[in-house]
Image: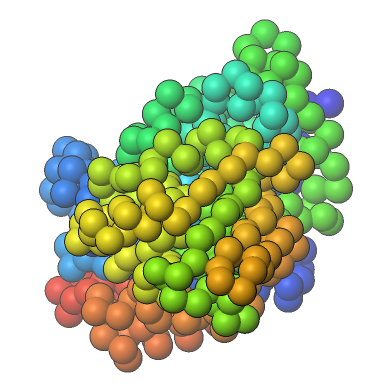
Amino acid sequence: MNVSAVLADFTAGLQPDMLDTAIRERIKDLLIDAVACALAAGRSEEMPQIEPLASLFGDEGHLTVIGSATPASPGAAVLLNAYRITALTFCDVYTSAHMHVTPEVVPPALAIAEREAAPGMRLLLALAAGLEVATRVAAGLDYPRLRQRGWHTPGVAGPFGGAAAVASLLALSPDHTRNALGLAGSQSAGTWAAWGTPTVKFHQARGALSGLLAGLLAATGFAASDDVLGAPDGGLLSTYAGGGRPDLITDAIGERWELMRISLRPWPSATPLQPVITGLSRLRDRGALGQPEEVRLTIYVAPGVFKQHSAFRHPAGKFEALLSIHHATAAFLLAGRLGLEQYEPEVYRDPALARLIDEQLDVVADEQLAPTACRIEVHGADGTVAENVAAPLGHPDNPAPHGMIVEKFQRLADGVLAPAAATEVLDMIGRLEDMPDVRQLTRALTVAAPSHPLQEKS
């Protein structure tokens, strides 16, 4: 079986009647979440470094940068929007392969949809294609084997999602779509050597840009590998994953939707910390946390989570704080909640928080726990109270309700978009399939719509 051809045929043949209501609503929720994260990216430490890089793609352009008043060239818009979505460690994640998906798929889809003045249904189909192809490729790469070799999934599988979204919007033939996937695979890269640095987020932004380049180059007729995934010599499945699981890529594609297994994060922090924050929230709601100075906590997590995240006990910067179990727990205890404001320098440098970490908090590796699980014990004067979490809030096994996603959007859009504009964006995404021109949405995502008029399709 030619695995790449199966994905290409699926992408080129995707039709509106293949998306039932549940799938459409899930795609819209993922889009709302991605846009919300991008709007708040001004709080990121790295945007002042990414923006000059993006300017090298040209200072002239007419495509939207979410949350900005300045339009950009296609390459710059995709790079900026992708990094903005992932900047605050708050976007979606396909947990079975530890892969953030929307940063690689949404930016190239928005850019081409805006450039082509595409109707909303075309964007919805492109997002469906991109999200499904990315997660299918990630599943087929057999994450334990991929991880053992040191590969970081977003940079490896992400370009496929972006390429599929662009190919869908450009209505490429199956053969040209297969070339787009071949070009995407030729740009697959990124390893865990980058862990603890913002480069892990750059893997996602570069993956989005790679997808854009792959789709646009394939549209010219440029030829690529016949099966970049399954080729015996250099195919990604054999080279990156010791053969992988091609059946997970092709099985019931178009009938069983892997994109429905994408998780959303209610709180800003690394994915493996979401179970801990879920448990802390439950304990708070039970009234079991008490006063911060009166309790001691023991947090049990999976060994892999402990290895990756306990190193940031006292974070030196915002990104390290977002990766730190100790910081997230201590900040939650002191504030009774966990928002972006708990990751500012005045918080992670607070001596009281450091003392709480050192004197009242233990993090322990437990081989019995899955990466999506944790156990929290609160030791107080009246004894010990425990909370077990099997799956964090936002995981497909414990899904986030639509209202929570809307509330997250409103919170992150506050201070960036006017309230009326934020409401308009939510309304337009809610009726995306009925929108005659996606530029209505992209114009609303700027902070100064009058300076960013609709451009006529060339």
Task: Give the image's coloring scheme.
Answer: rainbow
Q: Can the viewer see residue 440?
A: no
> In the displayed structure, does residue 131 sit left or right of residue 40?
right
Q: Nearer the viewer, residue 121 or 208?
A: 208
* Picture residue at 67% right of the left edge, 56% below the top: 375
Q: Is residue 136 above or below residue 123?
A: above
* Total count of labels: 0
Residue drawn where x is 27% and y is 61% of the image: 352
Residue occupying the point 42% across, 47% down: 323
Residue 319: x and y in percent read 33, 47
Q: Position of residue 446 (x, y in %)?
A: 26, 71
Residue sitting nearer the eye, 86 or 259 = 86
Q: From the viewer's perspective, is 394 left or right of 367?
A: left
Residue 371 lies in quadrant: top right
Q: Residue at x 15, y 74 (%)?
A: 451
Image quarter in which the C terminus is found: bottom left
Which residue occupies the extreme top position in the image? 233
Q: Tell me, yes or no, if residue 194 can be seen here.
A: yes
In the rendered image, which quarter contains the N terminus? Answer: top right
Residue 339 is situated, as x and y percent measured from the top left of the image, at: 38, 69
State the residue lying farthest toward the bottom. 420
- Residue 206 location (% of width, % of height): 38, 37
Eyeballing the image, is 117 above or below 209? below
